[in-house]
Image: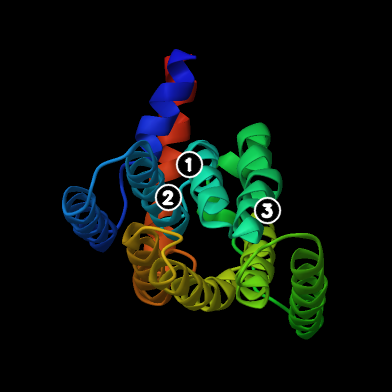
């Protein structure tokens, strides 16, 4: 267990500086949002979830596999927030993240080791499969959630769910094209949580969180190892050196 926590600690280091700047900017925004309105158990849980959620997406951006641990904890917070807002597909979205990304990352020894060295790109066939799958999930989810629940925003909820689910699967498969889906997901979630906030079903913190996610996704195209070859080589060397130090210690 001690070694595992040392591993998690290591995965929070060596990020591009811009990732740390974005995290502290997000933290400041969330603190201001928290203290500017009545503090309840829901606002506190939302604050914890958004803080860990931002760390999670920044870790993915930096090609660090601590996102598995952070994702599970933040998902619990977001599930409660989604239920309170009646955005039921946002609950399934978090469950899908846990099932397709967080738990596999936690259980897969190979995924956790030097992830930057395993980044791939879509082929033409991969693009077609990903796009068609996203549309199919959207249609089924929108119909199902609108028919069987009292979700007041079924089709807005559905587009956010479909894009985010696809992005999670693409991320686990280590395709850098995931960030096309993450940007679309960020925009869809901003719309969903802004409408939810205007209708009195959610706090402003979730809209701010989606905005930070979108900034992170745009940032990924410039400084992330998923796209920046120089940064990828730096992270690969860093991870190789860390693995070598562990072998020597054992």
Q: Earlier in the sequence, mark 2 or mark 3?
A: 2
Task: Look at 57% across and 40% down and name the residue there.
Answer: 112
Task: Look at 45% across and 68% down and name the residue there.
Answer: 193
* Mark in the foreground, 2 or 3: 3
* Mark in the foreground, 1 or 2: 1
**Label 2 SS:** helix
Instruction: Report the residue marked by disc 2.
Output: 53
Q: Is residue 244 above or below residue 26?
A: above
**Label 1 SS:** helix
Residues at marks 2 and 3 touching, judged by CB atoms closer than 8 Å: no
In this view of the protein, which residue sits in the foreground, 138 or 198?
Answer: 198
**Label 3 SS:** helix
The answer to whether residue 168 is left or right of residue 31 is right
Q: Quadrant of residue 146?
A: bottom right
Q: CA distance from mark 2 to mark 3?
A: 16 Å
Residues at marks 1 and 3 touching, judged by CB atoms closer than 8 Å: no
The answer to whether residue 62 is left or right of residue 39 is right
In the drawing, what numbered circle is on residue 92?
Answer: 3
Q: Earlier in the sequence, mark 1 or mark 3?
A: 1
Q: CA distance from mark 1 to mark 3?
A: 13 Å
């Amino acid at each position: 267990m001690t070694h595992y926590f040392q591993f998690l600690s290591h995965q929070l280091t060596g990020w591009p500086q811009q990732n740390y700047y974005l995290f502290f900017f997000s933290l400041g925004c969330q603190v201001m949002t928290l203290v500017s309105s009545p503090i309840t158990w829901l606002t506190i849980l939302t604050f914890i979830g958004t803080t860990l959620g931002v760390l999670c997406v920044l870790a993915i951006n930096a090609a660090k596999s601590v996102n598995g641990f952070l994702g599970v904890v933040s998902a619990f917070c977001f599930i409660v927030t989604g239920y309170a807002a009646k955005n039921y597909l946002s609950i399934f979205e978090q469950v899908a993240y846990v099932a397709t990304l967080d738990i596999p990352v936690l259980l897969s020894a190979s995924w956790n080791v030097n992830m930057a060295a395993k980044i791939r790109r879509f082929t033409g066939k991969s693009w077609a499969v990903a796009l068609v799958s996203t549309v199919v999930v959207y249609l089924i989810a929108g119909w199902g959630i609108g028919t069987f629940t009292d979700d007041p925003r079924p089709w807005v909820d559905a587009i956010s769910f479909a894009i985010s689910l696809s992005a999670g699967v693409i991320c686990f498969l280590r395709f850098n094209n995931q960030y096309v889906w993450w940007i679309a997901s960020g925009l869809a979630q901003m719309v969903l949580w802004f409408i939810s906030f205007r209708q009195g079903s959610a706090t402003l913190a979730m809209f701010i969180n989606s905005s930070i996610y979108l900034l992170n996704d745009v940032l990924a195209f410039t400084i992330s190892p998923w796209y920046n070859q120089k940064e990828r080589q730096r992270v690969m060397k860093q991870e190789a050196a860390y693995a070598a130090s562990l072998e020597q210690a054992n």
